[in-house]
Amino acid sequence: MSPTYAREIVTPELGVGLHLRLGALGPRLVGIRNGIDTAIWDPSRDPHLAARYGAASLAGKTDCRAALLDELGWNDDGVILIGMVTRLVAQKGVDLALDASRFLAEVPARLVVLGAGDRLLAERARQYADLAPDRVAFVEGYDDAFGHRIFAGADLFLMPSRFEPCGLAQMQAMAYGTVPVTTDVGGLHDTVIDDDRQRGRGNGFVSRSVDSAGIVDALHRAARAVKQPARRKALQRRGMGTDWSWTHPAAEHIALYGEMLTR
């Protein structure tokens, strides 16, 4: 779990009845963020992509975007493409994303969702896709190769979690040069920096509230940013230039184990 999530679970809201016991652990409760397998999540050698690319040359990402739009049956009319690869559960805020999708025409943007899980959420996602097939696409299930193509082809990656022990998808998105739009919870707080709040340091955009209104606002801000070529490229390169591997988390784990042995 992430450092922020470790702090969150000692509160009544996220401790779900265990907050007092967890809080009693004091400094023994330690959060260390996850890493991603950079041998698998690397757009410069990903076999699932229409084109490969890296931070130094992002031309291949444009090709991946065109290929994804073609796969979804959408024209490449310059509209922002938002991706979600997720479990369909309340924790992941899928319902909030679907509520926010009603405002996609304002951005303007399209949303593609790949995921499986709760039957009612899946049915709701299908309904949104049926009502607005030119704006929303829903693919039920989990197709690893298609997931990689979404990470590579999307302009923005939406992750509106209600709580997040750490999360991997936001890091996978940034490794692929796709700008994350998230809520400010758990591991998302520890990995995603809002570029409007810290201009020149940001790697994504963060909703000010865990609701569809906050998500719509964050999507508007993100869309404005990625329409500016220089700012978009800077956001992408900051995300791609960060080491999201297990190197640093593993070192933290080893240091923690060493400290435990000396107690």
Image: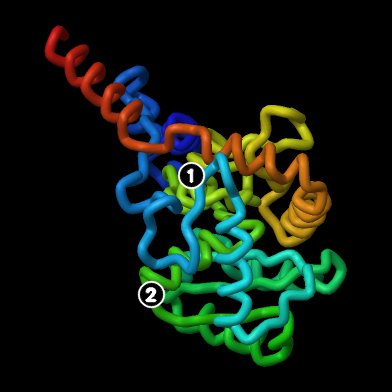
Residue positioned 83% across, 73% down in the render: 105
In this picture, is 168 found above or below 120?
above
In the rendered image, the residue lying farthest to the left is 261
Type of amino acid under label 1: Leu
What residue is pinned by disc 2?
143
In this picture, is 208 found above or below 200?
below
Give coordinates of residue 125: x percent, y percent. Answer: 59, 81
Type of amino acid under label 2: Asp
Q: Which mark is residue 14?
A: 1
Give coordinates of residue 8: x percent, y percent. Answer: 49, 36
Mark 2 element type: loop
Circles 1, 2 touching at the beta carbon (< 8 Å): no
Residue positioned 50% across, 81% down in the render: 139
- Which marked residue is nearer to the observer: mark 1 or mark 2? 2
Give coordinates of residue 178: x percent, y percent. Answer: 59, 52
Left or right of residue 162, residue 141 in this image: left
Q: Residue 142 is drawn in which quadrant?
A: bottom left
